Image (tube, rainbow, N blue to C red):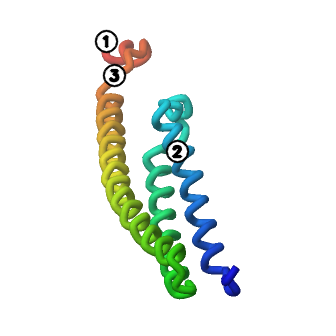
Amino acid sequence: MECSPCEGLYFFEFVSCSAFVVTGVLLILFSLNLHMRIPQINWNLTDLVNTGLSTFFFFIASIVLAALNHKTGAEIAAVIFGFLATAVYAVNTFLAVQKWRVSLRQQSANDYIRARTESRDVDTRPEIQRLDT
């Protein structure tokens, strides 16, 4: 092997494999609707965190590999792949932020409607009725 300082290549390999595994698990969960069985987790936020961190780490790993490569064809292809993956994850992060904002607005609107409805409900308690008569 010509790789004497391999840290950049190893870091890129770790980032790409980790992103592949985590994104694959989330893809399976969403595709099979298994996420509906665990409503305690905010899945929009989970997807946002995954895509945001993958974007950040792919960008850093691509810069490191671009700076520390040995100009072999495989390393140049990996750098190009890394920047393309960064761009795709960045678009997905943008879409996840929009989806998360919409879910926050819907949740706050539902909380507002619920609070207004509960404040309008009048309890018919017997002790209050006796005082009125």
Pick the residue in front: 50 or 116: 50
Amino acid under disc 2: Leu
Q: Provide the secondary structure element on which disc 2 rests.
A: helix
Query: What residue would you read off at disc 2?
Result: 26
| Residue 119 tag number | none
Label 1 sits on residue? 133
- Distance between the alpha carbons at the discs numbered 1 and 3: 17 Å
- Separation of disc 3 and disc 2 at Cα? 45 Å
Q: Secondary structure at mark 1?
A: loop
Horizontal and vertical percent position of residue 91:
33, 60
Tell me residue 114's x, y (percent): 34, 33
Please tell me which residue lies in front, 9 or 99. Answer: 9
Vertical relation: 7 (above or below) 46: below
Amino acid type assigned to the residue bearing label 3 in the image: Val
N-term-proximal mark, 1 vs 3: 3
Q: Residue at x 37, y 53 (%)?
A: 96
Which residue was labeled with disc 3?
Answer: 122
Q: Is residue 60 visible?
A: no
Question: Mark 2 or mark 3, which is nearer the start of the sequence?
Answer: 2
Q: Amino acid at mark 1?
A: Thr
- Pinpoint residue 103: horizontal percent, then vertical percent: 35, 44
